[in-house]
Image (cartoon, rainbow, N blue to C red):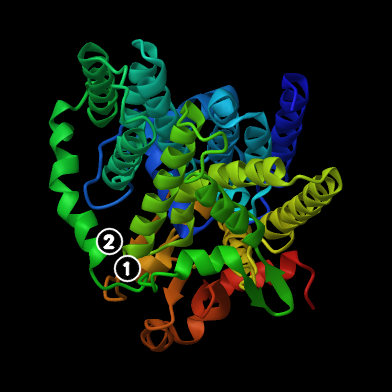
Amino acid sequence: MTRALAAALVGLALAAGLFLRVARLDARPMHHDEANQAVKFGALLERGEYRYDASDHHGPTLYYFTLPAAWLRGQHTLAALDEGTLRCVTVAAGVVTILLLPLLSGAIGRTAVAASAWFMALSPVMVFYSRMYIQESLFAAFTLAFAVALGRAVTAGGAAWPVIAGLAAGLALATKETSVLVLPAALIACGAAWWSARPARPSVLTRGALLAGLAAAAAIVVLFYSSFFTAPESLLEPFRGAHTYVNRGLGASTHDHPWHYYLALLAYSASGGLTWTEALVLVLALAGVWSAWRSEDGALDSRLFWRRYLAGYAILTTAIFSALPYKTPWNILPFYAGVVVVAGIGFAWLVRSTPSRLARAALTAVVVLASVQLGWQARRASVTYAADPRNPYVYAQTVPDAVRMASRIRDLASLDSHGTAMQVSVIASPYEQWPLPWYLRAMPNVGYWVDAGDPVAMQAPVIVSSMDHAPALDQALGERYVSEFYGLRPNVLLSLYVERDLWNRLLASAGAP
């Protein structure tokens, strides 16, 4: 494949990937994890406050990289933010992941890079979760950048690539705690590939370059975890929180799934007449792994090292994430990015290994048609069925009914004498309170309680309650309030209590008889 054709194909893939990621960013209600991240970012945006929370929220990069997006859109308060501003940050990370692939042109070939770019751009999993305001899209970009830079550092020498690898490692460490699993996996895969493919030649990575890379990683970690030197004491927090994430990854929880959960999600899902599959990528990745142990010209060369390195990286990271009992579907991204690259290698190897021009054309046509199908699935998952439980990528997702409830509360506030300052009481467990803090972010007097015993909570003209508190509230509020029911997530209902006088005003404003 010529350089011009490869550049054109990657450019088209980039455009397609960007379109799929930015279209209708508000189509899906905010997931409770997104809302939690958004409120955390709001404190940084409004007051310049950020402190790493050892028990939750992961690393700080997501919040600091959101600041420029908010400033560019003239949004300086939590109330002014919208889904587009937040999600465009993770969309940008998804696009960066595609842009990293041309760095591998000399390592795996232009055909493999072009194929990988299209798979990365159109993958329903990669598209769907890069449209969520969570850390995984950034984490996938940083860990893939580290893997690429590490390979270049080992094969090319010099100081630039080790420093880039260090910067990428530092950003990964400042994004998610699972970087302590992914980064060593890349190092092990790189070492094993170098030993097996080029045993007679020592690495060109010098001690000085290695120290420069480590210094770059340390500088990034210190910069972010100290909140840009405003809270140096926070540097110890990741170490204090290590046991939290170890227990979460290995202990029993509602997010425990069998080892094949991720592979099954990628291979085939069907529900309610809708089917979803990325089996094409998995099959081509297997071909890429097979090619890693074959030397086409009988000699050990640089490309064989890269094939073995990237195949080993994909296998190790997939095995690590599959072995952990704790699984959420967005954790696919960091290891699947490697799998996608190996799938591109597999496609290029199959094309080279097919002697007949007609057979190569048929193979290419099948992959092109299957890729179009991937893009169609990505659009369907991200927009048409963005919050539908039949969508396999939807996980504990907020339902549109919750958005309607928040809209109802805002309508009621417009009829109250206090306006947006109207008191609203939310009485529910923390899990059942989110994402209401996001949707009610413009109302300063929203209070949150975990039980119904506080008299202050019972004085609000509007009360939101989980169903386990509904019997007590029904008895306490009596005929003074009118109630409605709204869904929050699948199988999770909330009760909305409205003071009768305010309810009557709402009916009158709507022209009810």
Q: Element at badge 1?
A: loop
Residue corresponding to mark 2? 249
326 lies left or right of 467: left
Disc 2/disc 1 C-alpha distance (Å): 6 Å
> Which residue occupies the foreground of this view, 196 or 227?
196
Give the total number of marks visible in the rendering.
Answer: 2
70 lies left or right of 376: left
Q: Measuring from the top left, give residue 282's x and y in whole percent.
A: 58, 57
N-terminal-most mark, 2 or 1: 2
Question: In terms of image quadrants, where is residue 451?
Answer: bottom left
Callout 2 touching callout 1 (CB < 8 Å): yes
> Which residue occupies the foreground of this view, 444 or 188?
188
Hey, what amino acid is under mark 1?
A: Pro
Residue at position x 60%, y 46% from top?
346
Hey, what amino acid is under mark 2?
A: Gly
In the image, residue 372 sits, relative to residue 449, either above or below, namely above
Residue corresponding to mark 1? 325
Q: Residue furthest front?
A: 298
Q: In the rendered view of the protein, which quadrant contains the C terminus?
A: bottom right
For label 2, count other residues whose C-alpha is less than 10 Å away and answer few (under 14), some (14-19) or many (20+).
some
In the image, residue 264 sits, relative to residue 284, either above or below, namely below
Residue at position x 58%, y 72% from top?
501
Residue at position x 31%, y 31% from top?
199
> Which residue occupies the foreground of this view, 148 or 397?
148
Q: Measuring from the top left, give residue 161's x and y in whole percent.
A: 39, 17
Q: Element at badge 2?
A: helix
